[in-house]
Image: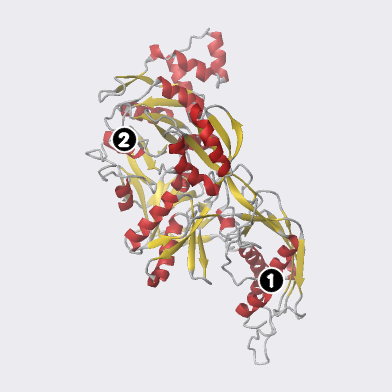
């Protein structure tokens, strides 16, 4: 079993290659066309209409005695979250590069991530039949821009014509392999020196497979997905050079959910890669997001680890972003299972280690959930969260309720589309990666849900961090506290990338566990809106005081909440105390900055530099044909639009989340969506209907 990802820059021919692989394996009788909208993996109507992949898709085919689960992923940067989830389930990957356009910005982002994760990767240079196709130039670009350890697996003939072909190297033509492989294999280097540069073809081939399997070397194949040239050689490489899935079917159940969709009847279907154990129909599975407390029979919150949000790293913990805090272990009974076989999925009574299974019956499952035991050294998030936000406005006011439900369905399938409900203004905001994704959301709402929408202006998502230390306390039965609870909180800056760290300075037994849990949950929820309306992160919140009235009843045995503390008392009091402490500490608003690398013709550098300055970009390094630096995330789209005109269409921009930096100039304010605990009078009028 091999779980294989197909990744590429948009328009490199990823989906066409998938069609050709399925055709070569005998799964389909004819090769589908992206232009004609009849490909096997682009099943959504919107994908067929636009000619792009939006959702990952899984198909299966056999190569000898190996079953390959092939996952076709989106290529457009706006759908990078979809690629991110696929990476966590791969055994190997094929990175597709165009023989005409060569290495592009998204190609670099993908290869950097594949190499960082150590995912074995083959490179397929597509479109050798196109006019302008290159061979030597592409190999130089691959070595210079992607990875130095690339190994050409053959040669091309009739390049740039319909008759272009690819011939794999035989034993007599592999002198260049030894140099590349010996640099990365001590045993091979010793043999290379001892044998004075003469090593057998079989030894080199075995070393190539070993180093490819470790992600150290990347074999390069050339071909055409349209004509089929070079595809047979690529299939041989997939079978021989990429490592098969590992896992003990008899071990404990461990898996990852990387996709969730709805069936025809609205039922939830989870796509899970199993790393260990086996799942049978009617099994009850436990699943959770992030590290969890897996003690038997305990549904208490999970242990919470800090999110990785350090400068220069795009990773971020979804649980913290959505304010979920500690995650309880959830469970569900599997009602049906299917696995992939010969291009489709078939019902089976069970699925085991190494397989990708579709699971029915898990109503509470979410993308990114761990099923059963967590994997050791499981990869974290690899790409930045979305940094843009826009308000979705229904064209018909009567669609407001249906719009929220439809957006909730979309967010369920893509958890990085964050929803923000504003009950005060009766509006819903969504967080996005870019304008293309916004267009796809609009078209999906119209096609799938019959809801026509427009969008307000796209804005940047900032964050707040405490500037100092602040503390506040309100005591039970002591004015002006109207709630039957005592809460004291201290807020102080935490380490950059530390998320929200909740700590205790009170004894564990000083409050019932339910009240302690309510305090922490409310703290995390309240920090989604700081003094300026942005999420507060990288802080330490310490519970310094606590108190409550024990449950009391009248003589008739009827519970009296007027003299007994409830969770509602703590839930209502915490925002007041927390915001008072945060006011005292003060906050700094940070905006997202993107790293950029701009390659451009030397004679266009002069006109480009003033534009970069106007957009707030800060060049760090500069040469005649290269500029690197940082630019505010809010100005990236404008730069992308201006670049073709400034560089005669020859400029190549590579951009990705870098870090947060303090906002310079006026502080952006985000409208609040809660009852505004910063205004005590207004807050209490909403919460208790009195001041």
Residue sitting at x 40%, y 27%: 240
Residue visible at 60% across and 72% down?
675
x then y, percent, for residue 665: 65, 52
Q: Residues within 10 Å of mark 2 (few under 14, many from 20)?
A: many
Q: Where 57 sits versus 452, above or below?
A: above
Q: Identify which residue is drawn at 45% across, 43% down.
A: 641
The residue nearer to you, when weighing 298 against 431, is 431
**Residue pushed farthest left?**
29
Q: Is residue 623 left or right of residue 441?
A: right
Left or right: 625 with respect to 32? right
Between tags 1 and 2, which lies in front? Answer: 1
Residues at marks 1 and 2, CA–CA distance in whole angstroms: 60 Å
Residue farthest to the top, as pictured = 196
Residue 585: horizontal and vertical position, in percent? 74, 60
Label 1 crowding class (10 Å Cα cut-off): few <14, some 14-19, many 20+? Answer: many
Q: Is residue 209 visible?
A: no
Quadrant where the N terminus is found in the figure: top left
Q: Provide the residue designation for mark 1.
A: 576
Q: Decide which of tag 1 and tag 2 comes sooner along the chain.
A: 2
Is 392 placed above or below 645 here? below
Q: What element does badge 2 sit on?
A: helix
| Whole-percent x, y for residue 183 in the image | 55, 19
Count the numbered circles shown.
2
590 versus 449 height, above or below: above
Specify the color scheme.
secondary structure
Q: Is 103 left, or right, of 321 in this rendering? A: left
Which residue does the numbered mark 2 point to in the structure image? 21
Which residue: 75% across, 63% down?
584
**Label 2 near label 1: C-beta < 8 Å?**
no
SS class of the residue under badge 1? Answer: helix
């Amino acid at each position: 079993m091999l779980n294989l990802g197909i990744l590429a820059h948009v328009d490199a021919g990823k989906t066409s290659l998938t069609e050709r692989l399925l055709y070569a394996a005998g799964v389909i009788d004819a090769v589908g066309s992206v232009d004609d909208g009849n490909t096997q993996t682009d099943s959504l109507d919107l994908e067929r209409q636009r000619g792009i992949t939006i959702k990952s898709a899984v198909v299966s085919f056999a190569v000898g005695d190996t079953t390959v689960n092939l996952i076709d992923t989106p290529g457009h940067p706006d759908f990078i979250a979809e690629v991110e989830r696929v990476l966590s389930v791969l055994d190997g990957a094929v990175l597709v590069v165009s023989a005409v356009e060569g290495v592009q910005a998204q190609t670099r982002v993908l290869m950097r991530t594949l190499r960082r994760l150590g995912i074995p990767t083959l490179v397929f240079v597509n479109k050798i039949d196109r006019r302008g196709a290159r061979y030597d130039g592409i190999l130089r670009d691959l070595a210079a821009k992607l990875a130095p350890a690339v190994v050409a697996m053959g040669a091309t003939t009739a390049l740039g014509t319909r008759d272009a072909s690819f011939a794999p190297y035989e034993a007599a033509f592999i002198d260049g392999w030894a140099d590349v492989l010996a640099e990365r294999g001590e045993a091979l280097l010793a043999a290379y020196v001892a044998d004075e540069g003469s090593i057998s073809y079989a030894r080199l081939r075995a070393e190539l497979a070993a180093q490819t399997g470790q992600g150290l070397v990347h074999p390069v194949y050339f071909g055409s997905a349209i004509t089929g040239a070079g595809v047979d050689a690529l299939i041989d490489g997939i079978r021989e050079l990429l490592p098969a899935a590992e896992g003990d079917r008899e071990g404990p159940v461990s898996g990852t959910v990387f996709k969730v969709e709805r069936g025809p009847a609205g039922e939830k279907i989870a796509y899970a890669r199993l790393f260990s154990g086996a799942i049978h129909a009617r099994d009850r599975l436990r699943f959770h997001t992030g590290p969890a407390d897996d003690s038997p029979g305990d549904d208490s919150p999970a242990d919470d680890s800090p999110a990785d949000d350090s400068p220069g790293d795009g990773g971020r913990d979804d649980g913290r972003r959505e304010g979920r805090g500690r995650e309880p272990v959830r469970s569900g009974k599997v009602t049906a299972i299917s696995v992939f076989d010969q291009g489709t999925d078939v019902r089976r009574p069970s699925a085991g280690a190494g397989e990708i299974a579709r699971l029915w019956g898990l109503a509470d499952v979410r993308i990114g959930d761990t099923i059963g035991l967590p994997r050791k050294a499981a990869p974290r998030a690899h790409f930045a969260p979305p940094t843009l936000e826009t308000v979705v406005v229904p064209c018909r006011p009567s669609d407001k309720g249906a719009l929220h439900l439809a957006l909730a369905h979309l967010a369920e399938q893509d958890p990085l589309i964050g929803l923000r409900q504003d009950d005060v203004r009766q509006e819903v905001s969504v967080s996005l990666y870019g304008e293309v994704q916004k267009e796809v959301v609009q078209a999906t709402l119209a096609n799938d849900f019959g809801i026509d929408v427009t969008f307000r202006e796209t804005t940047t998502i900032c964050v707040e961090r405490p500037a100092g230390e602040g503390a506040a306390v309100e005591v039970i039965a002591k004015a002006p506290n109207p709630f039957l609870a005592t809460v004291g909180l201290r807020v102080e800056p935490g380490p950059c990338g530390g998320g929200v760290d909740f700590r205790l300075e009170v004894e564990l037994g000083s409050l019932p566990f339910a009240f302690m849990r309510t305090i922490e949950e409310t703290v995390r929820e309240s920090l989604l809106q700081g003094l300026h309306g942005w999420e507060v992160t990288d802080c330490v919140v310490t519970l310094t005081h606590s108190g409550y009235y024990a449950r009391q009843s009248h003589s008739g045995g009827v519970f009296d909440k007027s003299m007994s503390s409830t969770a509602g008392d703590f839930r209502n009091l915490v925002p007041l105390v927390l915001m008072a402490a945060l006011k005292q500490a003060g906050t700094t608003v940070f905006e997202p900055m993107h790293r950029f690398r701009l390659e451009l013709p030397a004679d266009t550098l002069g006109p480009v530099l003033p534009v970069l300055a106007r957009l707030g970009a800060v060049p760090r390094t500069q040469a005649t044909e290269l500029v690197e630096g940082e630019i505010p995330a809010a100005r990236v789209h404008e730069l992308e639009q201006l670049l073709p005109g400034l560089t005669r269409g020859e400029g190549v921009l590579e951009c990705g989340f870098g870090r947060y930096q303090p906002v310079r100039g006026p502080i952006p304010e985000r409208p609040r969506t809660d009852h505004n605990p910063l205004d005590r009078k207004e807050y209490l009028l909403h919460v208790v209907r009195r001041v």
